[in-house]
Amino acid sequence: MTPEELRGRVEEFLAEHPVATTEPSAFLHARYQAGLAWVAFPEGHGGLGASRALQPLVSDLFEAGARGAYARHRPGQRRGALGDG
């Protein structure tokens, strides 16, 4: 998978799952289902079987696409750890 292909997947995902209107748990579920949580993980387990070197690109794209709301939608973060519940 190329960085350009991955960028397209993230942009499509964010268009279909707007951060501002998508419930955090639904957003994370959809992100794992799309393989965009941890791209190096196998398909069906939150990833795409892609190179681990692509994860920073995905993380940066999600953060940029979500603007300030990204913190509540990070994989591996528990809600209480962010101080909002």
Image (cartoon, rainbow, N blue to C red):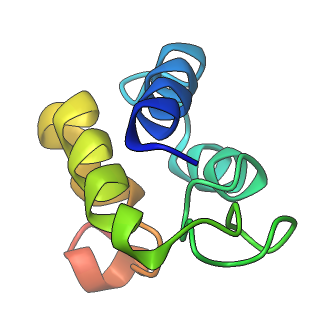
Is residue 1 found left or right of 84 in the rendered image? right
55 in relation to 21, above or below:
below
Q: Position of residue 23 (x, y in %)?
A: 55, 39
Q: Which residue sits at x=54%, y=19%?
A: 12
Looking at this view, is 3 or 25 the one in front? 3
Name the residue at the right extreme. 44
The image position of residue 16, as x and y in percent, is 60, 17
Image position of 44 (left or right of 46): right
Q: Nearer the viewer, residue 80 or 56?
A: 56
**What residue is shown at x 48% (from left), y 43% (from top)?**
2
Q: Residue at x 35, y 81 (%)?
A: 80
Query: Please, is residue 36 above or below residue 81 in the view?
Result: above
Quick one: which residue is furthest to the top in this view?
15
Where residue 71 sits, quadrant-wise, is: bottom left
Residue at the limit of the structure toward the left, as seen here: 68
Q: Residue at point 30% right, 57% down?
A: 59
Give coordinates of residue 45: x percent, y percent: 80, 74
Horizontal placement of 26 versus 73: left or right?
A: right
Q: Nearer the viewer, residue 7 or 34?
A: 7
Q: Which part of the image, by quadrant, shows the C terminus?
A: bottom left
Question: Number of numbered discs present?
Answer: 0
Q: Is residue 41 found left or right of 79 in the rendered image?
A: right
Q: Where residue 79 appears, x then y in whole percent?
A: 40, 73
